[in-house]
Image (cartoon, rainbow, N blue to C red):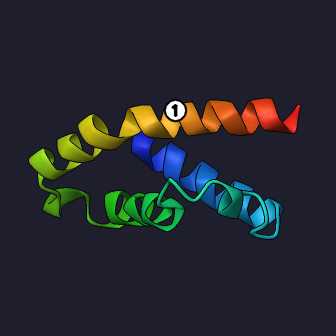
Amino acid sequence: MQLIAIGQGIKDVDKLTNKELLINYSNIPWRNIAGIRDILSHNYFNLNAETVFGILGENIEELKKTLETILKDLK
């Protein structure tokens, strides 16, 4: 599932930057995104599909825009 990859990527970026990059983009709940990775990975059969769909529908576009901004800022 792509949310697992996104969550793991966020964890990795935060670790590689010594937690100094993502704090500059506080409009995104980074900790929650990293946490959803753990929930999806370890509680797969106990997930509520509507909750996961809600996360995607409400937040994924803002996350995408912020990640694009981060990439632009790093260049």
**Is 26 displayed left or right of 73 in the figure?**
left
Residue at x-position 61% and y-position 54%: 10
| Quarter assignment of residue 74 | top right
Q: Is residue 20 above or below residue 44?
A: below
Q: Is residue 68 above or below residue 53?
A: above
Q: Is residue 25 above or below residue 34?
A: above
The C terminus: image quadrant = top right
Percent x, y for residue 62? 44, 37
| Quarter assignment of residue 15 | bottom right
| Relative depth, front residue between 42 and 21 | 21
**Is 58 displayed left or right of 16 in the figure?**
left
Percent x, y for residue 17? 82, 61
Q: Secondary structure at mark 1?
A: helix
**Is 35 displayed left or right of 68 in the figure?**
left
| Relative depth, front residue between 33 and 46 | 33
Percent x, y for residue 12? 69, 58
The N terminus: image quadrant = top left
Residue at x-position 13% and y-position 46%: 49
Q: Is residue 1 visible?
A: no
Looking at this view, name the residue that lies furthest to the right. Answer: 75
Q: Is residue 68 visible?
A: yes
For the image, the number of numbered tags is: 1
Residue density around tag 1, few if under 14, some if 14–19, many if 20 or more, within 10 Å: few
**Is 70 displayed left or right of 67 in the figure?**
right
Residue at x-position 79% and y-position 66%: 20
| Relative depth, front residue between 54 and 37 | 54
Residue at x-position 39% and y-position 37%: 60
Q: Is residue 12 above or below residue 19?
A: above
| Relative depth, front residue between 59 and 41 | 59
Q: Three-letter amino acid code at disc 1?
A: Lys
Q: Which residue is mark 1?
A: 64
